[in-house]
Amino acid sequence: MFKRFVVLILVLGLLIGGIFWFKQQQAAQMAAMMAPPPPATVTATEVQAQDWRPRLQAVGTVSATQGIELANEVGGLVREIAFESGQQVARGEVLLKLDDEVDQAELRGLQAALELARLKFKRVERLIKDRSVSQSEYDTAQAELSNARAQVASKQAMIAKKVIRAPFDGQLGLRAVSLGQYLPAGSSIAPLVKLDPVYVDFSLPERYLPQLAVGQTVRVNVDAHQQTFEGSLAAIDPDVDAKTRQIRMRAEFPNPEGLLRPGMFARVALDLGRNEPVLSLPRVAITYAPYGDSVYVIIDAEGKLTVQQRQVQTGAVLGERVVIESGLSEGQRVVLTGQVKLRNGAAVQIDNKVAPADAGAAAQ
């Protein structure tokens, strides 16, 4: 009986001890869960003040200062082609000739008739001095001479139209005719464009009208070339588009190497020509969201670093930096990278050595 009592006491003791141990472990786990997480490692940068020359951003299209589709005024058979596709041509250069044999023959007949009319008029002119012919005969001979001259000039003009010449210096496009082909009047022969200089047409909202002036510097970039082209604002449309409330503008760019081609998509930056002091941050430091842009400001409280999310108003983009219009002041430290793991009041530690190459350059 005593042995059973001892065994019961031991079993109860083990049971109570197990329960106590389990509670101890559970309390330790809860304490571990309630302990604050270690500080998050971030990189940091400061809000910088700098002088910036404001630029208005837009998109535009490259167009030729002169660009036409060469065509014939009169119909005819192609007798001679004096150009190749893509050729550079000078103003007045012969490009194509249509057959003019019949016109040349008719011209010779008209020239003979002109000579006859001239001789007749000279004879009547001598006779009228002696009053051997009437004034009406003189007038008739003079009219016949003028008519003969007009017919010769008309035929010569017709023959000249059968020689197609370049109306200006430029580069030809793809040839659309063949030797021996009959061309009705108005047939397409080849495009001709002048590539130096070129225009870039673009639009800006009407609110910028007071800041615009002919002669302002304009810079463009195109996808085909990794360089910036510089030109000047050549014209501002006097009308504002009633549908879009945009002002149409045209900039002119020298293009001696022909790198800019009509139809290219261009990213335009219009220089307003004055310096303004602004605050800026690297683009990677800003968290963009539909409800507004924000940054994490670093707060140093007695050596303990924490972060506070703050809404900011962003402005123009300056390369890899963004203008901060409101929400921050010069010299404030903000998180550059590592924002994803942060929340308001989170403890952080700064280690700019772990910043990516581009973000590190921006921080410096």
Image: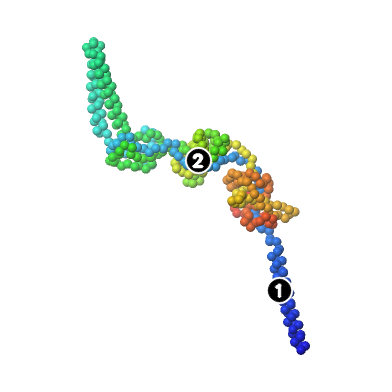
Say whether residue 203 is left or right of residue 286: left
Q: Which mark lies nearer to you, 2 or 1? A: 2
The local secondary structure at tag 2 comes to loop
Along the line of sight, the residue nearer the viewer: 13 or 220: 13
Residue visible at 63% across and 50% down in the picture: 294
Residue 275 position, x and y percent, is 61, 38
Residue 325 found in image quarter: top right
| Mark 2, other Cα within 10 Å: few <14 / some 14–19 / many ≥20 | few
Say whether residue 108 is left or right of residue 20: left
Furthest-bottom residue in this view: 1
Alpha-carbon span between mark 2 and mark 1:
75 Å
- The answer to whether residue 323 is seen in the rendering is yes
Q: Amino acid at mark 1?
A: Phe
The local secondary structure at tag 1 comes to helix
Residue visible at 63% across and 40% down in the picture: 51
Give the labeled residue for mark 1: 22
Q: Amino acid at mark 2?
A: Lys
Give the labeled residue for mark 2: 243
Figure quadrant of the N terminus: bottom right
Disc nearer the start of the sequence (2/1): 1
| Mark 1, other Cα within 10 Å: few <14 / some 14–19 / many ≥20 | few
Residue visible at 31% across and 29% down in the picture: 157
Residue 9 position, x and y percent, is 76, 82
Residue 329 position, x and y percent, is 68, 45
Furthest-front residue in this view: 242
Along the line of sight, the residue nearer the viewer: 170 or 240: 240
Along the line of sight, the residue nearer the viewer: 353 or 122: 122
Residue 24 position, x and y percent, is 73, 71
Q: Is residue 187 above or below residue 130?
A: below
